[in-house]
Every structure is written in C-alpha cells, then in structure tokens.
Amino acid sequence: MKLPKLRELIEAVKALIKGPYTSKFPKVPHKAHPNFRGQPKYNDKKCVGCLACVEVCPVNALDYKDDTDAKNPKRTLMHYTDTCIFCGQCEAACIADHEGIKLSNDWELSFFDRKEACETIEKELQLCEACGAVIACKDHLKWIATKIGELTYSSPTLYLSRLKELKIIDENIKTAAKDYGRSDRVKILCARCRRQSTLTTK
Ligand code: SF4
Ligand code: SF4
C-alpha cells in the first residue's frame, strides 16, 4: 500500500481543525478578499461631477443627466452595475485623487428588479447667469479654483465661485443690467457669454 505523503497528511489535519476552505454562501454572507475588484461606488463627498469617468468608461456603464429646470439645477451621475465590467478605468481617470469613484469589494449583484442595477449621486450645477447654459458642477469650479491658486483671480467665473464658497459674497446678488454691458463681465458666465460681454461694445 502506498503511504500518504507528509504534506498531504499535514493538509488533512489542518482541514480537520480549521474546517472546509469553501464558505457557506448563501446561508452565511461571503466576505470577499480585501484586494477583490468589485463594483465601483461613487463617493458624493469627493466627486466633483467633472464627467471624466463617464468619458473613459469603455462599456457606457456610466452616464449623466442635467436638470436645468429644477429650483436648484443639478447633475445626476448614474452607474449601471449590470453593464459594468469592473475594469477600474473610471477610478484611474478620476480627477478627485481617484476617490470620486472607487472599486469596492462588493460583488453581490443579483436582483429581481433591473432598476436596482442603477446607482446615482447628485451634484449641484452652476448655470451661466446670462443665458442659463450649463457651465459645470459647482464643486468642479471650486476644485479648479483650489488647484490653480491665485490664477483663479484671472477669471470672474472662478473667483466668484470661490468667493461664494467662502461666503464672502451673497449667492443671490444679481446685476440689474440685462444686456452685455460692462457689469456683465463680473458675472458667472459660460464661454459664449463671456466672449460676447468682452467683445460687445456699448
Ligand atoms: S469599472 Fe470600468 S466598466 Fe465599470 S464603470 Fe468604471 S470604467 Fe465603466
Ligand atoms: S470627480 Fe471622479 S467620479 Fe466624479 S465625475 Fe469626475 S471623474 Fe467621475
């Protein structure tokens, strides 16, 4: 009779003491390895709504919708967990120190209603004060202002966003002028209105 090898004997004794390697899922929830690449999750405290992640997603698992008619205009960012391939491109491209969206070790993706396959976060939008076009998310403008430091003060859109954040100016102050007069230069404007207010001479 062939005798078992010593290593196999040790493994058998270990298995007897520790129990089987497999987990008792679904009776007991399975905890994935800390390095497991599970579905990405948005972090609304870190995300600035720049859409870099939406641009790089290879399978269109990320999308967004701007609601400019709401009292507080907002951008909704969507992540479709049923389309995502967990490639991590969104996390790699995230401008918010790769923390606006991050792979988690959440792997449990089964559901009965497909609507549950969509996770969303909302970010406040900044609209042009002249034409109402979307400029960017307010957090994105603050992020740019912080990144470029004193250069912020070369752009009224950026420094007004920054001053509002610092609560140095009132959010609700609007100029009385409706045309592209000189006063419009000190407003939060989209690129088109900025050009018009600068080039139009009254
Ligand atoms: S992990 Fe990949 S597929 Fe999933 S949302 Fe991010 S970029 Fe898209
Ligand atoms: S900050 Fe990061 S997570 Fe948020 S929209 Fe930009 S790239 Fe995506």
Image (cartoon, rainbow, N blue to C red):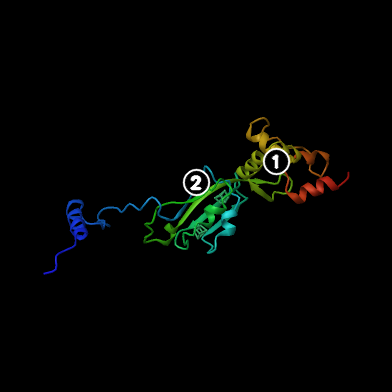
Q: Residue at x 63, y 32 (%)?
A: 166
Count of numbered tags: 2
Kindly indicate the quadrant of the structure image that contains residue 177. top right
Which one is earlier in the sequence, the residue at label 2 or at label 1? 2
Mark 2 within 8 Å of ligand 2, using the beta carbon:
yes
Q: Nearer the viewer, residue 155 or 58?
A: 58
Disc 1, SS = helix
Q: Is residue 37 left or right of residue 123?
A: left
Quadrant location of residue 201?
top right
Q: Is residue 96 above or below residue 165?
A: below
Q: Say if 65 sits above or below 158 in the image.
A: below
> Mark 2 and mark 1: span between their CA atoms?
24 Å
Viewport quadrant of the C terminus: top right
Amino acid at dot 1: Leu
Does residue 163 appear left or right of residue 63 in this picture? right
The front one of 20 and 5 is 5
Q: Position of residue 100 (x, y in %)?
A: 53, 47
Percent of width and height locating residue 116: 42, 57
Name the residue tied to disc 1: 158
The residue depicted at 29 percent of the width and 53 percent of the height is 29
Amino acid type of the residue tagged 2 in the rendering: Asn
Q: Residue 170, image x and y in percent? A: 67, 32
The residue where tag 2 is placed is 43
Q: Is residue 171 visible?
A: no
Q: Position of residue 83 (x, y in %)?
A: 47, 63
